[in-house]
Image (tube, helix red, strand yellow):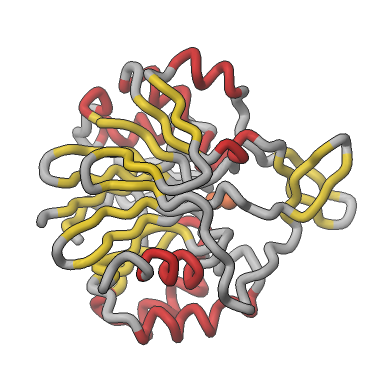
């Protein structure tokens, strides 16, 4: 079964025509139908889609991996370009999120209210569990934490009653495309852990065919890096395209270790996986 991915938004610009920002948006095409995974933080997603020759009016729907601004901020500009579409996310994606390190504190949540999204989308589908987004494509819902090294995400918080507390990232999920050759998995930031996500997908699939998206290995707890790389190496994954919060240092390690199974992500990439 043919599955194509196109990176519309990423931290690295792949060619002079494309723009980059701290964000992620990937268009997936399965048997001629396309679905948008995350929207980046600005209208760069729409501008890159145009530069790459994609008509966003053709997408079947939009899925959001979690509520951070760098995955959700571009949502309204995408919906303005695409026209009303179904939007899938976990209800906790609307929670107020903050980055805090010492004296520095800044808002990093979704910059839109639930009402604003409902007002411009065809339907807002909020689900804590797995949900089918289009035939053969589903959002995983909440990811069970089973590894001991993917427990914390330093500096990332939620706010309730004016109090910050460590973000539990209940909303962090992945997109899974089911194919006879195995699951194609798209992550967002993988705050719940790349290994937790892949173990969860492997409960229902024999094989991971490809993984595309952010890993947070470049921004999060550095103790995740080695065991994650070891786990990825053990699996028979055909293609890995990691980008966004994976960071240049980890991407470079992965290029060395995984050779031609690995592609460093950047805007403008269109690839069968
Ligand atoms: Fe991110
Ligand atoms: Fe994030």
Q: Residue placed farthest to the top in the image?
A: 119
Residue 141 vs residue 164, the one in the foreground: 141
Determine whether, in the image, residue 182 is placed left or right of residue 73.
left
Residue found at x 71% / y 52%: 167
Q: Position of residue 140 (x, y in %)?
A: 42, 52
Q: Is residue 16 left or right of residue 105?
A: left
> Residue 86, how many percent across, how many down?
36, 26
Corner quadrant of residue 203: bottom left
Q: Is residue 101 above or below residue 129?
A: below
On the question of residue 171 being in view, the answer is yes
Q: Image quadrant for the N terminus?
A: bottom left
Which quarter of the rendered picture does the C terminus lie within?
Answer: bottom left
Residue at x 31%, y 22% (from the top left corner) = 82
**Residue 9 appears anywhere in the view:** no
Q: Is residue 23 above or below residue 271?
A: above
Q: Is residue 33 left or right of residue 116?
A: left
Picture quarter containing residue 159? Answer: top right
Residue nearest the viewer, comparing 31 with 265: 31
| Total tally of numbered discs in the picture | 0
């Amino acid at each position: 079964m043919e599955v194509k991915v196109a990176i519309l938004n990423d931290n690295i610009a792949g060619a002079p025509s494309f723009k980059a920002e701290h964000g992620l948006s990937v268009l997936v095409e399965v048997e001629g139908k396309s679905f948008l995974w995350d929207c980046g933080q600005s209208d760069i997603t729409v501008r890159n889609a145009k530069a790459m020759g994609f008509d966003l009016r053709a997408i079947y729907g939009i899925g959001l991996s979690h509520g951070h601004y760098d995955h959700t901020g571009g949502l309204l500009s995408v919906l303005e370009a695409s026209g009303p579409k179904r939007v899938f996310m976990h209800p906790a994606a609307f929670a107020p999120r903050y980055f805090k390190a010492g004296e520095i504190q800044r808002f990093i949540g979704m910059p839109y209210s639930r009402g604003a999204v409902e007002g411009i989308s065809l339907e807002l589908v909020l689900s804590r569990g797995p949900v089918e987004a289009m035939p053969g494509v589903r959002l995983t819902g909440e990811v069970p934490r089973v590894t001991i090294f993917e427990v914390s995400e330093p500096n990332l918080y939620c706010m309730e009653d004016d109090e910050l507390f460590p973000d539990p990232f209940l909303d962090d999920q992945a997109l899974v495309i089911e194919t006879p050759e195995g699951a194609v998995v798209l992550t967002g930031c993988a705050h719940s852990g790349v290994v937790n996500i892949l173990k969860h997908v492997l409960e229902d699939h024999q094989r991971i065919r490809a993984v595309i998206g952010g890993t947070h290995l470049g921004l999060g707890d550095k103790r995740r890096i080695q065991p994650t790389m070891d786990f990825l190496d053990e699996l028979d994954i055909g293609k890995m395209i990691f980008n966004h919060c994976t960071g240049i240092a980890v991407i470079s390690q992965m290029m060395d270790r995984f050779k031609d199974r690995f592609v460093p992500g950047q805007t403008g990439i269109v690839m069968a996986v």
